[in-house]
Amino acid sequence: MAPSTSPSPVFDPDYYPARLNATLHSGRYEILRKLGEGVSSSSWLVHHKQGEPGYRYLAAKVLTIDATERHTTGQCRELEFLKEIAARKETDYLPLLRDDFVEQGPKGKHLCLIQDLHSTSVSALRRSSPHKALPAYMARNIISMLVKALEQLHEMRIVHTGDEFNSSLASAEIYREKVGGVRVSPSPLR
């Protein structure tokens, strides 16, 4: 199923009311189409008008008012971890934060995270396959990239706590507080 090109017919006021051809960050990013939507954000293909060649088309993850408030109060630290990842030299398998800002909507503030575009999700790729399964070589490549990404996160003492790779990141310290007694060694599985 192709991503929709406009907001849902039933608009949830917690989401930013993005419209095609509207701009974000004082005109810097033009919204071209919707990429997807989750529980706490919507994602949009944007054109960076002053972007350097090769980085003119990016993804804008626009958080809901509630998710933005969780960042403000320190309950969610995704932005902090994305900035830490962006400061590293080796981020081949991790999302790279290009910009972040707050956009004012009619009902409240929305944190916007601008990142490089990535491919479709593994689930969507699998569903689009003729047999609804990935070929072995593709599954091996995906697993290899996932392990390398987790290795890079582990080296930064960031633990991925979600059941999907793109869901949530937490520091090892927070994970220890929640789970208790977790030993995090700086050396990854090899």
Image: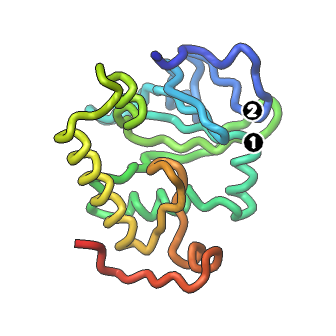
Q: Quadrant of residue 101?
A: top right
Q: Dot 2: what SS? A: loop
Residue that appears at 39% across and 26% down: 127
Give percent across and percent down for residue 89: 28, 62
Question: Is there CB contact under 8 Å for labels 2 and 1?
Answer: yes
Give percent across and percent down for residue 173: 56, 78
Q: Residue furthest front?
A: 131
Q: Is residue 50 visible?
A: no
Q: Quadrant of residue 50?
A: top left
Callout in the foreground (2, 1):
1
Give the residue pinned by disc 1.
65
Residue that appears at 31% across and 31% down: 133
Give percent across and percent down for residue 159: 47, 67
Inspect the image, locate mark 2, and give the three-letter code of the amino acid beneath it. Answer: Gly
Inspect the image, locate mark 1, and give the three-letter code of the amino acid beneath it. Answer: Ile
In the rendered view, tell whether residue 87 sits above or below residue 179. Answer: above
Give the residue pinned by disc 2.
105
- Specify the quadrant that holds the C terminus: bottom left
